[in-house]
Image (cartoon, rainbow, N blue to C red):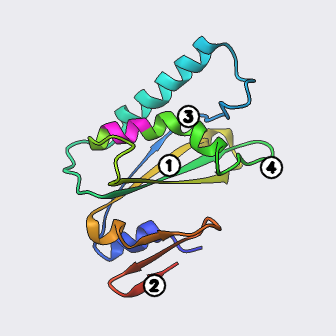
Amino acid sequence: MIDFAAELERRRGRVVTWFVPIATPNPLNGSHGHWRVKQGRAAEHHEETVTRAPRDIRWTFPVVVVLRRYYCGGPHQLDPLDNLPAALKYVTDGVAEVIGIDDGDARFHVRFEQERVPKRTQVGVGITVIQGARIAETLHFVDDGEVSAHVQGLAIG
């Protein structure tokens, strides 16, 4: 699979990336503790996302945010339609705060991905923000989860 973020950067796109070393369990199955524990985890996810973000960036809208969850352990992935967005909700809120936009704004698009890693030290969330109208408006998300992009008439994907 081609690294579309690197390809877009190569084609003069504005791509900003950072990594947040947090575990992101599924909050919808009810097995992750008392409400205070969940609230503390939510605050940690949000704060870590904001504090590790690059500073002094003048953001260009619209943006496409790609959140890639790196997990370790069993072969089970979170369901990409509801559980994965729920597990990354507070990271999404942190990214929106960093960018200075509401996460429900039409200029803020989020893409969720996940990947199994061999070591627990590699668990976390990789954040990629692709900014600018020319790039963000040309990304098309298709139902099978693949991303295809057409930048200045050239296909990536």
Q: Name the quadrant containing residue 154.
A: bottom left
Q: Which residue is mark 1?
A: 126
Task: State which tag comes first along the sequence, 3 or 2.
Answer: 3
Q: CA distance from mark 1 to mark 3?
A: 10 Å
Looking at the picture, tell me which residue is in the foreground, 140 or 40: 140
Quadrant in which residue 11 is drawn: bottom left
How far is mark 4 from mark 1, CA to CA?
19 Å
Residue 85 in the image, given as x and y percentages of width and height: 57, 44
Q: Is residue 94 magenta?
A: yes
Amino acid bearing label 4: Pro
Between marks 3 and 4, how big is the CA–CA gap?
19 Å
Which disc, if any, is residue 75? 4
- Residue picked out by circle 2: 155
The amino acid pointed to by label 3 is Ile
Mark with earlier residue (2, 4)? 4
Task: Report if the CB atoms under discs 3 and 2 are less than 8 Å apart.
Answer: no
Q: What is the secondary structure assignment of the residue under circle 2?
A: strand
With 141 as the anchor, is 70 left or right in this view? right
Q: Which mark is residue 22?
A: 3
The structure residue drawn at horizontal position 30% and vertical position 58%, both measured from the top left corner, is 62
Q: Position of residue 60 (x, y in %)?
A: 23, 57
